[in-house]
Amino acid sequence: MKRESDHICFCPLEGVIDIISKKWALLIVNALGNRERLRFNGLMEDLGGISPKTLSDTLKELQAEGLIKRESFAEIPPRVEYSLTRDGVELRKAIMPLLKWAATREHVNKGCASTYRGVPAHRIKEKR
Amino acid sequence: MKRESDHICFCPLEGVIDIISKKWALLIVNALGNRERLRFNGLMEDLGGISPKTLSDTLKELQAEGLIKRESFAEIPPRVEYSLTRDGVELRKAIMPLLKWAATREHVNKGCASTYRGVPAHRIKEKR
DNA sequence: CAGCATCCACATAGATACTG
DNA sequence: CAGTATCTATGTGGATGCTG
């Protein structure tokens, strides 16, 4: 008994998967969503444990997708700032329900220490 | 200026990514959401081009995650039916906003022929 | 029919070292 | 500071053939 509301075209899913399947992509989008703008090393710290190569690669893809904006300042030392585009902000909103769903599942609280309470959409990183 | 509503713990993101990053996982969840229950080969057709190995692997993972249910009937020829669990249905709902977001992006209509209009949450597969 | 076994190809991501 | 260059490890998925 399906209704119109269920009739969503999943064609775009292919493209979406290309983006979200990248392990760090959503984390980056989120980090930028929290901080408004971040520099390369700022992202490195925020994400905890990402390699510069992976970060660089992912940033380029997100740029190509039009989800983040890169602003480079001709200074010494060089400064580059990343921020979400309007589309990026929309994506971040779109994944919230997914997050909430994930948060209702059992294996959630484990590992998410109270230390991190109040840290907006953080991510713990014990794995180092 | 962040408000409480933005303070979502992204810890679970790690787990979520493990699920959704699997290229076929969301497609399977969706297919089962559309059809209620499907058999192995039914899924093969619906998904268009997935290999039995990959389907088998993914189904097992989704089972392990408690997102789909597997029912085997001792008949000849053997019959096995897959369907979404409650959690699976919730996941499907949770990704809808993501889908809608994807659907608003430019490169959407391209490839999504009118032939498929009315096919609930389908996916085209030219690539064969 | 519903898979499993095997082998293979490719994409992603980490470590490390180095550069404009 | 903000990356790039390599090299490697792992995972994810496809092809093919076989089985209960």
Image (spheres, coloured by chain):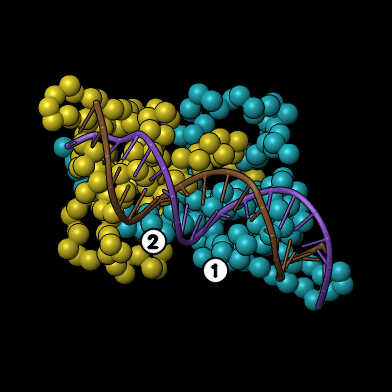
Chain colours: A cyan, B yellow, C purple, D brown
Q: How crowded is mark 1: few (under 14 residues within 10 Å), some or many (20 or more)?
A: few
Secondary structure of the residue carrying numbered label 1 = helix
Q: Are marks 1 and 2 on the same chain?
A: no
Residue at 16 percent of width and 37 percent of height: A1
Does D10 sit above or below residue A88?
above
Identify the chain of the residue marked 1, using the numbered disc in the image: A
Name of the residue lying farthest toward the right: A76
Does A121 sit above or below residue D13?
above
C-alpha gap between disc 1 and disc 2: 17 Å
Residue C6 pos. (x, y %) = 41, 43
Indicate the quadrant where residue B66 lies. Answer: top left
Indicate the quadrant where residue D20 lies. Answer: top left
Answer left or right for B104 relative to A44.
left
Report which residue position mark 1 lands on. A64
Figure quadrant of the C terminus of chain B:
bottom left
Report which residue position mark 2 lands on. B104
Residue B76: in sight, yes or no?
Answer: yes
Residue B34: in sight, yes or no?
Answer: no
